[in-house]
Image (tube, coloured by chain):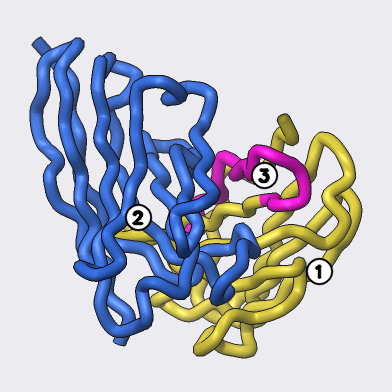
Chain colours: A yellow, B blue
Amino acid sequence: ETVMTQSPATLSVSPGERVSLSCSASQSISSSLAWYQQKPGQAPRLLIYTSSTRATGIPARFSGSGSGTDFTLTISSLQSEDFAVYYCQQYNNWPLTFGGGTKVEI
Amino acid sequence: QVLLVESGGGLVKPGGSLRLSCAASGFTFSDYYMTWFRQTPGRGPELVSYISHSATTIYYGDSVKGRFTVSRDNSKNSLYLQMSNLTAEDAAVYYCARDRLRFSSSWVHDFWGQGSLVTVSS
């Protein structure tokens, strides 16, 4: 099983800041990586897939990069609605697996 | 708009059974692979089961194999998860989710339901 490790576990930031979230895979996953955002009591929301492709309706301030084992989600200017938990998910190796999440808080 | 609504969750005793349903609307349900995930507090989602658009391909996670059964009724735009011999480790919020691609599996899920809470306790 491919283990996904996200860092940091918690990120304390202010609105308007640029933030970068990291995700590492225990083995190569090519570019088969997705990012999801989850707010309390809500379902996950797809942000990015294939490492860098924004899902429909996702603002341009969200961007993804990386390939192989190391990936980054960047939010260029954090908005109030972006405070949430972010999960990475690999789908190159079976079974598909998620990281433990990074909580972005004020 | 795409809408997925789970139902059927609740409190069940260890060893008991429960059937979850997921009602889909706003898209051609019969065109899409569907997946059940579950999530416990503070952890990422875990894939439980998926079923292809025509129900010819089905997968179960190792932790539920032999105890859970996924099915779908395309005429009713509905997805189901029959869960039996439940243990405390099965307690979670269960989500149904749609694969991003039609007639294929991308393993990326673009729409998720709001979840159904399953509690296993005596």
Residue at image location 54% in from the left, 49% down from the top: B57
Q: Amino acid at mark 2?
A: Cys
Task: Please report the bounds of the magenta region as a residue range.
Answer: A90-106
Residue hosting label 2? B96
Whether labels 1 and 2 share one chain: no
Pointer 2: residues within 10 angstroms few (<14), some, or many (20+)? Answer: many
Which one is in front in this view, the residue at disc 3 or the one at disc 2? 2
Are the numbered discs 3 and 2 placed on the same chain, yes or no?
A: no
- Chain of the residue under the numbered disc 2 shown in the image: B
Look at label 3 and name its amino acid. Answer: Gln
| Residue position for label 1 | A65
Left or right of B98? Residue B75 is: left
The residue lying at 34 percent from left, 29 percent from top is B68
Q: Up-down: is B85 above or below B6? A: above
Q: Secondary structure at mark 2?
A: strand
Numbered tag placed on residue A6 in the rendering: 3
Q: Secondary structure at mark 1?
A: strand
- Specify whether residue A84 is in view: no
How far is the residue under mark 3 from the one under mark 2? 24 Å
Using the image, tell me which numbered label, if any, was put on residue B56. none
Q: Is residue B108 left or right of residue A29?
A: left
